[in-house]
């Protein structure tokens, strides 16, 4: 095995796309073992030392052996596909049937071992990835306490932003985004209910895809809300995010909603990586609601992003609003409160008898009995959710669910996109995530630049159901035109 990859620019691996990494591997310049070792070295330097990012909650003790096995397989049979030998880190609410736990950051599940892989974990293994570890997160996917800080979990502690500990890390897929930014892994997977991929991706200068609900199976993922939950990739480039998305898609009998993706999902999204995709595109921006209200430094970044999009050949259409939901009087999170209890109870009820919790009520009691460690920020959301019946028969739930669909889709995004013949909507960071989340529609976050103080700002493109191909193209064109991604300076 030649070691010529070491002679390249010192940060080549941190900048290289998966396609470039695979070329080096096939040329014998790099191995999966070397790549995994580099990631582990970065974890040693900066997870609990150095920058103390605290992004990784657990490392797979079999990772090195898996990498060696995949290297041997490459020599004997060739590579399985573009993810062969590529290390990936999963958010710690995604099940893995191995020596790692699945806890959603909760102490109540700190000894929980899954019986089988989540569907997406199985797909990633079949694609040849090395499951390198689990990422820390905001506990219970940020549905535990109104006062909980982004990136904090009782089990894992506080995740920090590699672009400055004073910068909000975003949540709830905090560790996943930080792990990608700091090259603790080539790829990571997060989950989103409403902003939990888009927020940390934006805050950590990486790319995050929140797919259409139904594109990717949720089987084996600790739930929050069955009407809004989805997993999605986080990476350092649109290219890598597109490659990983293709490995995750497909129908799954364990998750009924995936049947809506028939003939609308793809195994390869790289054909959409078109650097000219913004040319003649129509992008909608509700400037007064989402841009003008930003702090001055972030507003200037977004104004520059809009100009760059225009220079790339797009028409930016000024909108008064996106949805009636943008009026405070029509906004609520009842759907999450009611679905969380029902969905979590169903998940916890299947845990083995040795588990200390089998319901949301059990979790609340466990936290109360271990309050010194488990309740740093309280659990008011858990308590509020547990007051619901768990049957979702309450008029408040049903009315909110129907209203959400109407206001986000048929009186919201659908109408605006059609009326103005838009290819996408544009938002700063995760500010538009709520409307798209209630609609179940996709979004992609891409680095949009930095404030003068060095805080990352994300540019988010959102669209209609199963418009991932178009959104990937627009994000790629913007990325290539601006190249705002830069490595964090870790000490």
Image (cartoon, helix red, strand yellow):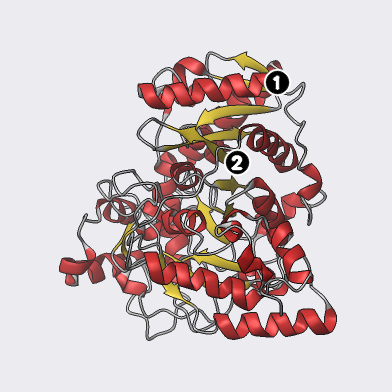
Residue identifier under label 2: 444
Q: Going 57% across and 40% down the picture, which residue do you hit?
A: 446
Is residue 188 toward the left or the right of residue 1 in the image? left
Q: Considering only vertical position in the picture, is 392 above or below 120?
A: above
Numbered badge on residue 137: none
x and y percent of residue 216 in the render?
Answer: 66, 56
Rendering quarter of residue 319 = top right
Q: x, y percentage for residue 85?
A: 68, 72
Q: Nearer the viewer, mark 1 or mark 2?
A: 1
Q: Tell me which label, 1 or 2, sits earlier in the chain.
A: 1
Work out which residue is located at the far left of the displayed protein and give it. Answer: 372
The answer to whether residue 25 of the structure is visible from this angle is yes
For mark 1, what is the residue? 314
Q: Nearer the viewer, residue 105 or 186?
A: 186
Considering only vertical position in the picture, is 468 above or below 283?
A: below
Residue 411, by quadrant, is: top right
* Residue sitting nearer the eye, 450 or 116: 450
Q: Quadrant of the C terminus?
A: bottom left
Q: CA distance from mark 1 to mark 2?
A: 17 Å
In depth, the one of 475 and 424 nearer the eye is: 475
């Amino acid at each position: 095995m030649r070691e010529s990859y070491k002679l390249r620019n010192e940060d080549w691996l941190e900048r290289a796309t998966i396609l470039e990494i695979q070329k080096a591997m096939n040329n014998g310049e790099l191995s999966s073992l070397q790549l995994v070792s580099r990631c582990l070295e970065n974890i040693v330097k900066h997870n609990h030392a150095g920058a103390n990012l605290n992004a990784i909650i657990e490392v797979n003790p079999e990772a090195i052996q898996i990498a060696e096995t995949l290297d041997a397989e490459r020599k004997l049979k060739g590579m399985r596909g573009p993810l062969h030998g590529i290390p990936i880190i999963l958010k710690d609410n995604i099940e893995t049937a191995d020596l790692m736990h699945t806890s959603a950051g909760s102490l109540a599940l700190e000894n929980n071992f899954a019986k089988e892989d989540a569907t997406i974990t199985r797909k990633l293994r079949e694609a040849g990835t090395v499951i390198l570890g689990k990422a820390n997160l905001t506990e219970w996917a940020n549905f535990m306490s109104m006062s909980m800080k982004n990136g904090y979990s009782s089990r894992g502690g506080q995740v920090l932003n590699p672009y400055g500990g004073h910068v909000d890390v975003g949540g709830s897929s905090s560790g996943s985004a930080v792990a990608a930014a700091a090259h603790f892994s080539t790829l990571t997977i997060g989950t989103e209910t409403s902003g939990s991929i888009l927020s940390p991706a934006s805050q950590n200068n990486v790319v995050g895809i929140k797919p259409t609900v139904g594109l990717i199976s949720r089987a084996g993922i600790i739930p929050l809300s069955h009407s809004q939950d989805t997993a999605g990739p986080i990476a350092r480039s649109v290219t890598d995010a597109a490659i990983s998305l293709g490995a995750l898609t497909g129908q799954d009998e364990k998750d009924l909603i995936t049947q809506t993706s028939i003939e609308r999902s793809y195994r390869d999204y790289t054909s959409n990586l078109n650097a000219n995709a913004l040319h003649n595109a129509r992008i909608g921006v509700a400037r007064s609601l989402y841009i003008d209200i930003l702090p001055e430094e972030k507003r200037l970044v977004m104004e520059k992003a809009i100009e760059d999009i225009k220079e790339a050949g797009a028409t930016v259409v000024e909108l008064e609003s996106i949805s009636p939901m943008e009026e405070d009087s029509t906004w609520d999170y009842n759907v999450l409160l009611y679905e969380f209890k029902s969905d979590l109870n169903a998940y916890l009820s299947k845990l083995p008898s040795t588990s200390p919790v089998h319901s949301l009520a059990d979790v609340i009691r466990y936290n109360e009995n271990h309050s010194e460690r488990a309740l740093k920020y309280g659990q008011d959301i858990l308590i509020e959710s547990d007051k619901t019946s768990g049957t979702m028969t309450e008029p408040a739930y049903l009315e909110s669910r129907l209203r959400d669909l109407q206001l986000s889709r048929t009186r919201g995004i659908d109408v605006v996109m059609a009326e103005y013949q838009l290819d996408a909507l544009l938002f700063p960071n995760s500010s538009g995530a709520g409307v798209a989340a209630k609609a179940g529609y996709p979004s992609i976050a891409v680095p949009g630049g930095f404030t003068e103080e060095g805080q990352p700002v994300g540019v988010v493109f959102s669209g209609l159901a199963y418009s991932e191909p178009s959104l990937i193209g627009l994000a790629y064109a913007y990325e290539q035109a601006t190249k705002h991604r830069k490595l964090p300076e870790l000490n």
